[in-house]
Image (cartoon, helix red, strand yellow):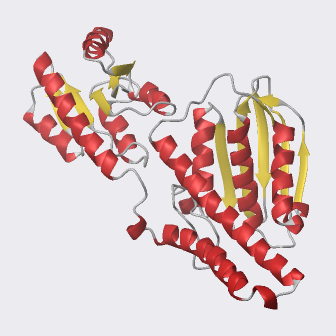
Amino acid sequence: MNKNRILLVDDELKIRETISELLTHKNYEVISAQDGHEALEILENWIPDLIISDISMPVMDGYSFHEIIRQNKFLETIPFIFLTAKNDNNEMRECLLNGADDFISKPFKVSELIQTIETKINRFNKIKNANNTFNVTKNNFLIHEINTPLTGILGSIDLLIENEDNFKKNEIALFYDTIKTSGERLNRTMQNLILYQNLKNNTINFSENSNSEILETFLKVKDKISKVDESEAKRIHFNIDPSDVKIHQNHLYFILYELIDNGLKFSPNDKTVLVTGLKFDEKYYELTICDSGIGFSEDELKKIDATKQFNREVMEQQGLGLGLFLSKIIIKKKKGVFSIVSKLNEGTKISIFLPLK
């Protein structure tokens, strides 16, 4: 049985060690940090079931740390308990008004700490189990992305069955192409949803020993795009130096496919997407993807998130908007850097820095 995970944040070493030892003895998995900044670095690669944080800390205090957590889609529902050394009703009231789930005053009783933790984690697990998937009834884009390809598949099959003797070979081939394209679109939607859930539940193992050759992986992506639409593949121009990077090939393939496909999708049919790659320094490889698409506004760049789509009323794009968001998460988990520069109606440049093997 998996242990419940707790992130403990406190600048006092003795308190961290004492609470960590106590919770480990109670069969919790505990990771500790000395301030909010260090805690955020931990959260890039490890999602807990509960966060316990001191308020008064150097570098980043508990309030600032809590505010950042509440603005993150992956982390906002995690129970958050403040530790405070002050028996101050005003501070305790402020903790709750700011959205904390509870607070514990130092010094505290062990029984009080354990009871509070168990109550919050049990409640969190019930909420997590009840809301562990997208709410289909509240997400019209998800309904659209499932129903549209499914209708294409079933409609084509019905027509073939009912009129098999009336179609010529080339007409039947067109139906097969429609079924295949719709099936691939539906499969991509479902695979992205599964990946999102696995990342959200922290069930993917990002091995430190995973490596892939970047040019080889890119060529596989380009070949896949060519099989779907040869004219689209011809719009991809590239200049990529071969190199081994520290990321599993499946994850690199996903990132490249999603970002290049987005560039093609949102660029005019007569415009190219340029992909370049070379060693940035002794530690990182830089890969850039530039398009001439509709671009993002400065405000939109701040809102890139799971299922967040832009300009849907202008362009009937396919997809849930997960690709860009999931790519960012995977790159961060592999200790890489993701940056995006974009201007409306001019295009977008995405830069990825991945650790070299």
In what quadrant of the picture does the C terminus appear? Answer: top right
Residue at x-position 28% and y-position 38%: 79
Residue 118 on image: x %, y %: 20, 30
Answer with left or right where residue 137 lies relative to residue 183: left
Answer with left or right where residue 251 lies relative to residue 41: right
Residue 69 on image: x %, y %: 38, 41
Residue 102 on image: x %, y %: 18, 36
Residue at x-position 24% and y-position 33%: 81
Image-quadrant location for residue 189: bottom right
Does residue 345 show up? no
In what quadrant of the picture does the N terminus appear? Answer: top left
Foreground pick, 146 / 329: 146
Image-quadrant location for residue 107: top left
Image-quadrant location for residue 240: top right
Seen as rendered, the residue at the extreme front is 165
Foreground pick, 219 / 72: 219
Foreground pick, 78 / 159: 159
- As displayed, is residue 166 above or below residue 354? below
Residue at x-position 74% and y-position 44%: 253
Does residue 95 show up? yes
Foreground pick, 239 / 347: 239
Number of numbered labels in the structure image: 0
Residue 355 on image: x %, y %: 71, 28
Answer with left or right where residue 260 lies relative to residue 325: right
- As displayed, is residue 250 above or below residue 211? below
Answer with left or right where residue 104 lies relative to residue 292: left
Residue at x-position 33% and y-position 23%: 8
